[in-house]
Amino acid sequence: MDTLVVDHPLAAARLTTMRDARTDSATFRAALAELTVMLVYEATRTLPVDKYQIHTPVARTTGYRLANPPLLVPVLRAGLGMANAALGLLPEAAMGFVGLARDEKTFEPRAYMESLPADLTGRPVFLLDPMVATGGSIEHAVRLLTTRGASEITVICALSAPEALAALAEAKLPIRIVTASVDERLNDSKYIVPGLGDAGDRQFGAV
Ligand SMILES: O=P(O)(O)OC[C@H]1O[C@H](OP(=O)(O)OP(=O)(O)O)[C@H](O)[C@@H]1O
Ligand SMILES: O=c1cc[nH]c(=O)[nH]1
Ligand SMILES: [Mg+2]
């Protein structure tokens, strides 16, 4: 499983804002949106392009566009904070949605919403979720996508835990990970350490 760690100084600065417990919700959301732009920028670096002819005011030249723009799929709630930023870089992209909430005792994801195209054969997918902790939520979301035929899935997250990367690699899913950090570990409540707390609550308030 390919894992790209985007360790750019500007990404580290936004992540620092998000980690800081004193950061309010509005500032947290802004930092996540800006970080998402950087992560999506790096995630799209290797996507194939189509060439086509255009005219500048001066001459004919070659133009470029993505050959096959990815379907964007934020994982609600926390992934909602990445959706608009990703769409800003990929205005031609379509968007699907998956709603998952992790059970506080079992740590298993509970699915409460899915809105996805029926056939994802041949369509690259960018799955957006700021946190990949045990990896259970992402594995659930990926299986919803592969059931529909997706075979090229990029997981874009702010923070990941080594435990999740090991579990996802073991599951042999057709994914690559683009993350701003692989943190130290999970604690007994399966929160990422040092992490940033609950990414949904930090953006939208506790439920
Ligand atoms: O890797 P895992 O151990 O599955 O944990 C990660 C999940 O937990 C968070 O969502 P949460 O369940 O808190 O829902 P929320 O976005 O509504 O807060 C996060 O956004 C991931 O979806
Ligand atoms: O650290 C964590 C783990 C799961 N979900 C979060 O929002 N944060
Ligand atoms: Mg949460």
Image (spheres, rainbow, N blue to C red):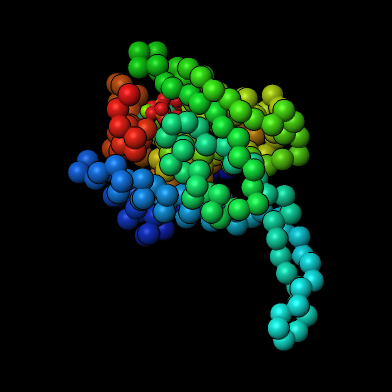
Q: Position of residue 92 (x, y in %)?
A: 65, 52
Position of 85 with respect to 201 (left or right) is: right
Between 57 and 124, the one lying in front of the other is: 57
Horizontal and vertical percent position of residue 121 = 76, 34
Q: Percent from the top left, x then y, of residue 122?
A: 76, 39
Q: Using the rendered image of the protein, determine whether residue 38 is visible from the camera's viewpoint.
A: yes
Q: Is residue 102 depicted above or below 176 in this figure?
A: above
- Above or below residue 126? Residue 170 is above
Tell me the quadrant of ligand 1. Answer: top left
Q: Position of residue 206 (x, y in %)?
A: 30, 27
Tell me: residue 6, above or below residue 175: below
Residue ID at (74%, 54%): 67
Q: Is residue 25 left or right of residue 49?
A: left
The quarter in which the N terminus is drawn is: top right
Name the image quarter holding residue 48. Answer: bottom right
Quadrant the C terminus occupies: top left
Residue 64 left/right relative to 201: right
On screen, residue 183 versus residue 147, left or right, reads left
Residue at 51 percent across and 19 percent down: it is 112
- Depth order, front residue of 5/85: 85
* Extreme residue toward the top, this view: 106
Residue at position x 47%, y 31% from top? 76
Q: Using the rendered view, name the quadrant where residue 146 is placed.
A: top right
Compared with 31, 161 (above or below) is above
Q: Residue at x 40, y 40 (%)?
A: 159
